[in-house]
């Protein structure tokens, strides 16, 4: 039921393990495949390996920051690693990163020869290059995508960044240059935290933020592309459960990719997500996962299309025994009062902002027309 | 011991031993190590010359270098050598001391010694001679542009774009009058840089003042003398040097004449030489992907040797700006943060 066709590749499920050091060589790629992933993406392979800086990864319970992580295996060695990765028959997508179109074309054609099933262009890392992410320039992306698409016969995915003012333009450039699909998003430029005693950021330079922190941005990037450009999308960013994965699919993604969750919890999260997705699909009587693709987009309107309707709470007396008055304290319109076991909403003061409905731990308040 | 006995002792197939010798990059590191240990203990060395007769390969390539004392060339050679070693090849390095006759001699020597392929670094060999070598059917790759043979397999750097990017940056931080110190060198990078300079000035509606373009020797001394001539001809707010060495000399001369960099005048270089990050003020410059030039030169050569490359191939690399203090912007726009 989870089977899907992505860019001509038959995936047993739409869950892909994203590019990163957890997929740094053949053995680890095979592990990710064995965990049940529909496909796996290699750590980004570059023209020349670089010295790693350290420390380069930091995390907390909501996500992670990393700086400059690329494959430390030269392209020559990937012939061997690809063979190992593919020895159990999984689908392996090779991620590549470089500064010029001809380098990218070279790396892509080599990896195709070594057996990669598709190429992912990772030109969206917020580190190292400069303040301006390559993927924020549609013309540069066009040039790079074109050079690679002309050099290979396998599908080409271009990984996009949230660090751009108009992601649709970039996605459109990918399509026009012959790219088969896009993935979104890469990490978002950021600083995880600062050690107050030492007056020092945990990592010594700006890095890419991933995990829960970026999921809302990733969801919006995916939805924006889905609503504006006709191109298959792989959704990435902060996915650690089946629910998250399904959200991406409902906003128009064809597949999803998982990075930080695999890094922080281990590869078994992949099997769990696949299992839970399967259960959800069965319980909802869905025969093919593709049926849910983009379903939530109909309910995602542009600002202009939104109706100015006077939503207010219809409920005037909410029975509430909880020892909590968060709704009362947070109502910015002074519309909520509590007397004993009853929460009272004043219909004339309530403007229907909706905050109380999500702030109530028991979800007792609701809005109606 | 012969190859069969090596295989038996190491507990692997003859094919695997052969792969260690011919395509070591395709063998798992642990296996490779084990086999190499057995070979070493047995004192086994493959007879490459005999192999050259048998299989038409000597597992050697030639690398022709303009001048060995130039660290940039060595950086490139380092990239070539690394890829060659990964492929189980030995590299013959030939130092031609910028002499065309020596270069010719070396090339024919390499061919006589049956190398599998040749890489020529910034060669100025004439077209007729090159055509003759090509007749020998020996795989040949250029590092650096070869003016009269643009279609030949090569690795090049887009220096025009690199220069244009730097000039754009200087204009963006407020410099309008930019002097250009142009060094003579065999790499022809300078000419491309000059084109980049002219294009960018034009795009910004700035008239290129020919007096502000000064030719000089590509050295520290050249920079020193060149900038004096430049300052006598006009008084630019910024100096663009086509190499870091020229920039060092220019900085020295400017300091000698009592100017502070970058307060009074900005200076930028080209190359990202090791010293550029050490002198004060640290030099803003353009990084050349030297090692990568060597790596890709060797990669396309081996693709030709293995017969994988069906046609001549050009790889174009890009430079990167290294914005430091000497260009005098306070706001650090576009810096490598
Ligand atoms: C430690 C680390 C290393 C990464 N390395 C790469 C990489 O080599 N290439 C790439 O395209 N993305 C890389 N990423 C980005 C992830 O593939 C992914 O796009 C991003 O982390 C968002 O997804 P997530 O929240 O599921 O991790 C890396 C992320 C992390 C955390």
Image (cartoon, coloured by chain):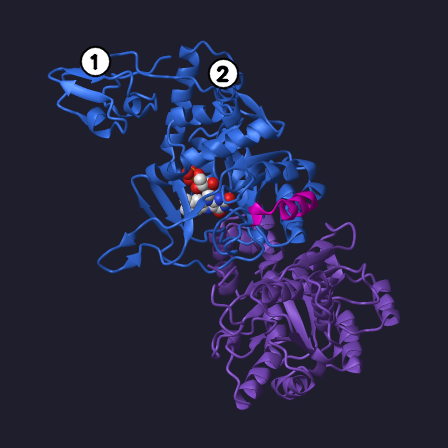
Chain colours: A blue, B purple
Give residue A1's mark. Answer: 2
The rendered magenta stretch, by its main secondary structure, is classed as: helix
Q: State whether discs 2 and 1 lie on one chain.
A: yes
Residue A326 is drawn in which quadrant?
top left
Position of residue B4 relative to residue A264, above or below, is below
Give residue A177's position: percent from left, percent from top.
69, 40
Is residue A167 shown to the viewer in this render? yes
What residue sits right under mark 1 in the picture?
A: A318
Comparing A304 with B238, the one in front is A304
> What is the magenta range?
A134-148
Compared with residue A115, is residue B315 higher up or lower down, i.e. above or below?
A: below
Q: CA distance from mark 2 to mark 1?
A: 42 Å
Badge 2: chain ID: A
* Res. B247 image quadrant: bottom right
> Would you say residue A142 sits in the magenta stretch?
yes
Quadrant (top left, top right, bottom left, bottom right) of the N terminus of chain B? bottom right
Left-right relation of A243 to B20: left
């Amino acid at each position: 039921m989870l089977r899907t066709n992505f860019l001509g590749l038959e995936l047993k499920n739409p869950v892909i393990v994203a590019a990163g050091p957890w997929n740094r060589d053949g053995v680890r790629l095979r592990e990710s495949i064995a965990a049940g992933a529909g496909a796996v993406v290699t750590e980004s392979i570059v023209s020349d390996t670089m010295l790693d800086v350290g420390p380069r990864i930091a995390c907390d319970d909501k996500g992670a920051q990393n700086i400059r992580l690329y494959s430390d295996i030269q392209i020559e060695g990937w012939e061997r690693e690809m063979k190992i990765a593919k020895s159990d028959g999984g689908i392996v997508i090779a991620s590549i990163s470089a500064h010029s179109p001809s380098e990218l074309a070279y790396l892509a054609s080599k990896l195709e020869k070594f057996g990669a099933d598709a190429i992912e262009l990772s030109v969206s890392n917020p580190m190292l290059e400069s303040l301006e992410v390559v993927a924020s320039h549609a013309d540069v992306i066009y040039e790079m995508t074109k050079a690679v698409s002309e050099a290979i016969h396998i599908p080409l995915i271009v990984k996009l960044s949230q660090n751009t003012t108009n992601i649709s333009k970039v996605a459109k450039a990918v399509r026009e240059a012959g790219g088969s699909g896009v993935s979104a998003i890469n990490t978002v430029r950021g600083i995880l935290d600062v050690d107050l005693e030492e007056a020092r950021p945990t990592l010594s330079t700006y890095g890419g933020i991933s995990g829960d922190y970026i999921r809302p941005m990733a969801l919006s990037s995916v939805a924006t592309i889905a609503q504006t450009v006709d191109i298959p999308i792989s959704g990435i960013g902060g996915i650690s459960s089946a629910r998250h994965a399904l959200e991406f699919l409902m906003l128009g993604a064809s597949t999803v990719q998982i990075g930080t969750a695999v890094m922080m919890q281990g590869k078994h999260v992949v099997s769990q997500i696949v299992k839970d997705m399967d259960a959800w699909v069965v319980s909802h009587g869905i025969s093919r996962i593709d049926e849910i693709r983009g379903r939530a987009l109909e309910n995602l309107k542009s600002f202009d299309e939104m109706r100015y309707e006077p939503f207010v709470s219809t409920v005037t007396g909410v029975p509430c025994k909880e020892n909590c008055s968060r709704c009362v304290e947070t109502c910015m319109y002074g519309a909520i009062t509590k007397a004993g076991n009853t929460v009272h909403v004043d219909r004339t003061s309530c403007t229907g902002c909706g905050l109380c409905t999500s702030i109530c731990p028991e979800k007792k308040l609701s809005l109606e027309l | 011991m012969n190859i069969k006995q090596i295989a038996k002792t190491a507990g692997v197939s003859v094919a695997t031993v052969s792969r260690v010798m011919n395509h070591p990059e395709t063998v798992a590191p642990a296996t490779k190590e084990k086999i190499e240990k057995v070979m070493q203990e047995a004192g086994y060395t493959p007879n490459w010359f005999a192999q050259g007769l048998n299989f038409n390969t000597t597992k050697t390539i030639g690398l022709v270098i303009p001048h060995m004392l130039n660290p940039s060339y060595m950086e490139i050679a380092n990239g070539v050598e690394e890829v060659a070693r990964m492929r189980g090849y030995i590299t013959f390095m030939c130092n031609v001391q910028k002499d065309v006759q020596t270069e010719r001699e070396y090339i024919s020597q390499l061919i006589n010694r049956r190398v599998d392929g040749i890489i020529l670094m910034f060669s100025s060999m004439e077209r007729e001679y090159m055509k003759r070598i090509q007749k020998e059917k020996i795989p040949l790759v250029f590092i650096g542009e070869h003016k009269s043979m643009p279609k030949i397999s090569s690795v090049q750097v887009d220096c025009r774009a690199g220069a244009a990017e730097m000039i754009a940056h200087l204009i963006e931080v407020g410099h309008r009058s930019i002097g250009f110190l142009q060094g003579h060198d065999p790499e022809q990078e300078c000419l491309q840089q000059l084109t980049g300079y002219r294009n960018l000035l034009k795009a910004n509606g700035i008239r290129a003042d020919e007096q502000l373009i000064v030719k000089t020797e590509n050295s520290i001394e050249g920079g020193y003398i060149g900038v004096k001539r430049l300052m006598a001809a006009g008084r630019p707010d910024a100096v663009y040097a086509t190499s870091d060495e020229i920039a060092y000399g220019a900085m020295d001369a400017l300091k000698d004449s009592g100017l502070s960099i970058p307060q009074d005048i900005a200076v930028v270089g080209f190359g990202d030489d090791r010293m550029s990050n050490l002198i004060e003020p640290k030099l803003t410059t353009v990084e050349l992907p030297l090692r990568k030039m060597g790596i890709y030169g060797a990669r396309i050569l081996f693709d030709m040797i293995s017969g994988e490359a069906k046609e001549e191939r050009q790889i174009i690399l890009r430079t990167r700006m290294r914005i430091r203090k000497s260009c005098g912007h306070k706001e650090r726009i576009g810096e490598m943060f």
